[in-house]
Image: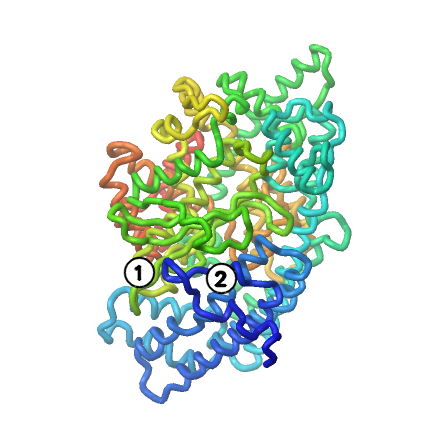
Amino acid sequence: MSPASPDADNPLLAPWSGPYGGVPPFDRVRVEHFRPALEIAMNEALAEVERIANDPSQPTFENTLAALERSGRTLDRVQTVFSIYTSTMNGPQMQAIEREMAPRLAAFRDRITQNERLFRRIEAVYEARERSNLDPEQQRLAWYYYTNMVRAGAKLDAAAKKRLSELNQQLAGLYTRFSQNVLADENERFLLIEKESDLAGLPQSLRDAAAEAAAQRGHKGKWLILNTRSSVEPFLQYSDRRELREKVWRTFVDRGDNGDEHDNNAIVAEILRLRAERAKLLGYPTHAHWKLENQMARTPERTLELMRAVWRPAVARVHEEVADMQAIADREAAAGGPKIRIEPWDYRYYAEKVRKAKYDLDTNEVKPYLQLEKLREGMFYVAERLFGFVFRPVPEGSVPVYHPDVRVWEVTDRDGRHVGLWYFDPYARAGKRSGAWMNAYRSQEKFDGPVTTIVSNNANFVKGRPGEPVLISWDDAKTLFHEFGHALHGLSSNVSYPSLSGTRVPRDYVEFPSQLLEHWLSTPEVLSRFAVHYQTGEPIPAELVQRIAKAETFNQGFETVEYLASALVDMELHLAGDRPIDPDAFEREALSRLGMPSEIVMRHRIPHFGHVFAGDGYSAGYYSYLWADTLSADAWEAFTEAKGPWDTAVAARLKELLSRGNTVDPAEAYRAFRGRDPGVGALMRKRGFPVPDAASTSASSAR
């Protein structure tokens, strides 16, 4: 190896060094490091697995499962930084590496899951778990490894394993192409506004953000509306220019669906075909049945039952909301304005008019109090008061970051003991995927000694002018708290084995802590301290808080139907088996069958549905948000039934629940927290829908 080659002294391959148990070496990473680092780390991991599989001694928990937990650490570190770059720093050079390496990583994973000698050792430990003096967490780990291996094809014959690996590699390549196509449409398509008159209706904060976005892209003196949700939705909410609202809306909803080199329809059809073949190969009727087997819901039928129960009242509420909006539009037409019928690009705009008319609440009145940095302080307040977590910024320069926008805090308990690190990457930029998410850079563990976690929150807020506070919408503030809930879940972890740590829980359970934390945003304690006017510093008026509370269930028809349409279509796509799918036609027909109101589109249309087609994660699993919200609504009522949002006894039980990761069955863990299974009544009350007679139906009873 030449000293000048990129894998000589490759920073990605060394254990993380520095403070806080080691941190990622972002200051030394270059894009050309990734390919050799991944190759070397995969070979190292395979060698470690071979040693375990070929151990001549009898299989035990220690020489098999604990050994597997110790293996692959170099690859874990490399893949962590690789995923950070592909999601937040994904330029052309990085995308080429991602396209090359995604299928190779899939083949690598299959070499492990299809290692027959390894599986026989895991199977032996699993079958002897109850007579081997294993503690409950060790038994859970044995179950975890065994079931994952079986579900990944460990029991297939050689020919079937070969075909399965081919399918997984093809899918990995398609997922990469899908996500890169969406990223291209988000980066390359936008609205450039050249006349100030076309800014009519936009609040000053949004105008400033659009001016800054334009300046960053070489259009100083103009305004640019980025093709990301955090930029598009405020524009649709406030812009008086209906033709521009339509243009922005179409650009956003047509991501991946423009009939050009970035069109995703053929990719989606191929993903669905390959998933259906894989499911049959593994012995399942459909991909949906395979995905849900080890989730809380267990079966597609259970998810459809819950979704359809909520769909009907939600659609009824949409018709009421549209009638209210159309009445306002008709009055405006009678006064000399244009005669219109409410269309999807009108919904948010006229919803604001209804909100003001019904609740005397104008979101423009609220936004000056919603400063990003003050709300971040509010999240820290909630974390300390509920869980005892204290956030302090790390000394400048002590922890490297991958972009100047990223900042880092140390998290301790109230006694000053180190808990972990929290990285915050809040702003949109070219090469960063849209949306908001949480990552775990390092999982908490303690079986070979204490290892603390490193977590991050990522968002796509549009920067304003230098030195000015970033003002965000109420919905964006809820998203901020939502993603912080994931981070608190990771920071609460207190388990032995990293595979069961933090947020590594079933997909329809992982959204429960995040959706629960959203409730604390609207508490008087948070708003009075941290919702302060960006110019005067005055706290948000109490009567304005009361108006926000009264409007809590406003527009729930829209929000629920927009989401549920995507969740139902996702499930139907993956229940279709091996039937050939034309995504656009399937979407139209499925929504027609559902009775989708014409004034709304799916929150994520199929050609840009990254949750489902940029990977396997949420495929046949987008229902998870509703399933988890059944838990979160019920858990919030545990607080309100006690002494309120800050009840210390309930908070202690909640922290204990979050601390257990995947060491116990989620339904059992929730039952221990609540004393019973959750029903759907709390969910319906939260959304302002009628509570059905069967409100006692449990989201956990499928276990």
The kind of residue on which mark 2 rests is Pro
Number of disc labels: 2
Counting from the top left corner in percent of width and height, residue 412 is at 31, 49
Question: In what quadrant of the picture does the C terminus appear?
Answer: bottom left
Q: Which residue is mark 1?
A: 495
Whether residue 315 appears in this view of the structure is no
Helix, strand, or loop for circle 2? loop
Counting from the top left corner in percent of width and height, residue 590 is at 62, 45
Helix, strand, or loop for circle 1? loop
Taking depth in this image into account, of 451 and 354 the one nearest to the observer is 451
Residue 133 versus residue 348 in the image, above or below:
below
Q: Which residue is mark 2?
A: 25
Q: Residue at x 42, y 64 (%)?
A: 17
Q: Which of the two labelled residues, at mark 1 and mark 2, occupies the earlier sequence position? A: 2
Residue 230, image quadrant:
top right
Q: Residue at x 25, y 45 (%)?
A: 652
Question: In what quadrant of the picture does the N terminus appear?
Answer: bottom right
The kind of residue on which mark 1 rests is Val
Residue 133 versus residue 636 in the image, above or below:
below
Counting from the top left corner in percent of width and height, residue 658 is at 33, 51
Q: Is residue 185 left or right of residue 613?
A: right
Q: Residue furthest top?
A: 335
Distance, label 1 to label 2, CA atoms, is 26 Å
**Callout 2 environment at 10 Å: few (<14), some (14 to 19), or many (20+)?**
some
Q: Is residue 607 left or right of residue 407?
A: right
Q: Is residue 339 left or right of residue 364?
A: right
